[in-house]
Image (tube, helix red, strand yellow):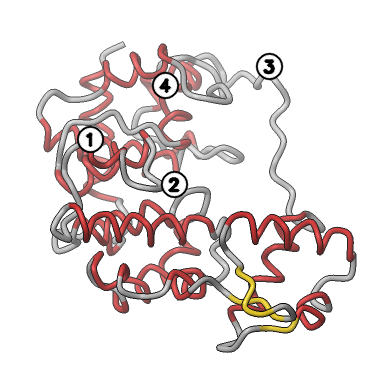
């Protein structure tokens, strides 16, 4: 496969069709890009746009967030889901303020040492914020490469060394072009080469896609199950946090218990929130967001 030709065609498509997202604009700061990466983990762009803008308006630099109580970060996280990300972002802002002069580091090892930053997030920040040459493998990019290069509908459950090697083959040598490819391949997966309803006829590389050229064979790997939410402990945790976020004062345990009908599930969810540090005991009878 001519990977360079694939890259060129995807970049031309991206230049013509890319969404105007605020964290992609030239004036976006590394901190704003870092906030977007935390928020976009397992969350679609449409749900992130408004909270991201509110967040960076309120806390335009790591030091501003670090100076705020951790509970305010959880409150501002709203209904984005997976609220531990808010605590980790607050903790990362504190480390950046204390150890990196308030500037998001442009070094991989220093990024990986920050709370909540794994290998993908570090690569994404280095690529999108600093224009470095990095393999950025999110779900969308993995799906694009699985179809284009592997001829299969979906990638495996977790990235493999073989996948990383394929991604490296497609990655341009010139750092700015590599950074554009990272964004462009992600955009192609998000808008065209989607999981449920791929728009192959609109794809700029359909003539070079092994999966399309072989007739789009159905997935024969392990059954792919969507994540449920209704009635889960996640939903219960969200309901309890919603009550705490809506109050500027500690909430009585009895009031919080009334937010969920299944009391065994309530107790289990509350215990997990306390263990995660998302909820703290204010008094013997009341609970609150962390200080």
- Label 4: which secondary element: helix
Residue topped by disc 3: 220
Which numbered tag is attached to residue 191? Answer: 2
**Depth order, front residue of 218/162:** 162
Q: CA distance from mark 2 to mark 3?
A: 24 Å
**Depth order, front residue of 42/179:** 42
Q: CA distance from mark 1 to mark 2?
A: 29 Å
Cβ atoms under marks 2 and 3 closer than 8 Å = no
Q: CA distance from mark 2 to mark 4?
A: 16 Å
Residue topped by disc 1: 108
Residue 140 vs 242, above or below: the answer is: above
Sequence-wise, the earlier of marks 2 and 4 is 4
- Label 2: which secondary element: helix
Sequence-wise, the earlier of marks 3 and 4 is 4
Position in image of residue 182 (x %, y %): 28, 36
Residue lying at 65% horizontally and 61% vertically, measured from the top left:
274
Residue 168 vs 41, above or below: the answer is: above
Residue 111 vs 162, above or below: the answer is: below
* Category of crowding for the residue at label 4, using alpha-carbon neighbours closer than 10 angstroms: few (below 14), some (14–19), many (at least 20): many
Position in image of residue 10 (x %, y %): 28, 34
Residue 285 appears in the figure: yes
Q: CA distance from mark 3 to mark 4?
A: 17 Å
Residue topped by disc 4: 148
Residue lying at 43% horizontally and 57% vertically, measured from the top left:
39
- Label 3: which secondary element: loop
Residue 184 appears in the figure: no
**Depth order, front residue of 229/194:** 229
Sequence-wise, the earlier of marks 1 and 2 is 1
């Amino acid at each position: 496969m001519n990977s360079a030709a694939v890259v060129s065609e995807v970049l031309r498509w991206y230049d013509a069709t890319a969404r105007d997202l605020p964290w992609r604009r030239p004036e976006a700061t590394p901190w704003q890009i870092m906030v977007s990466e935390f928020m976009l983990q397992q969350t679609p762009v449409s749900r992130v746009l408004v909270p991201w803008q509110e967040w960076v308006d309120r806390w335009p630099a790591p030091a501003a967030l670090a100076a705020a109580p951790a509970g305010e970060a959880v409150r501002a996280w709203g209904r984005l889901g997976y609220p531990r990300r808010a605590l980790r972002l607050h903790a990362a802002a504190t480390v950046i303020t204390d150890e990196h002069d308030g500037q998001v580091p442009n070094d991989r090892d220093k990024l990986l040492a920050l709370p909540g930053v794994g290998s993908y997030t570090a690569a994404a920040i280095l690529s999108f914020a600093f224009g470095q040459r990095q393999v950025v493998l999110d779900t969308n990019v993995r799906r694009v490469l699985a179809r284009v290069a592997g001829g299969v509908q979906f990638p495996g459950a977790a990235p493999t060394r073989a996948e990383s090697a394929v991604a490296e083959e497609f990655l341009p040598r010139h750092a700015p072009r590599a950074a554009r490819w990272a964004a462009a391949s992600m955009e192609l997966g998000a808008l065209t080469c989607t999981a449920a309803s791929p728009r192959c006829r609109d794809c700029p590389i359909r003539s070079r896609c092994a999966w399309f050229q072989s007739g789009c064979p159905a997935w024969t790997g392990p059954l792919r199950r969507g994540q449920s939410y209704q009635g889960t402990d996640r939903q219960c945790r969200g309901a309890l946090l919603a009550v705490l976020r809506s109050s500027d004062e500690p909430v009585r345990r009895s009031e919080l218990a009334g937010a969920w009908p299944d009391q065994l599930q309530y107790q289990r969810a509350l215990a997990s929130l306390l263990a995660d540090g998302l909820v703290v005991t204010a008094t013997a009878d009341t609970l609150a967001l962390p200080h």
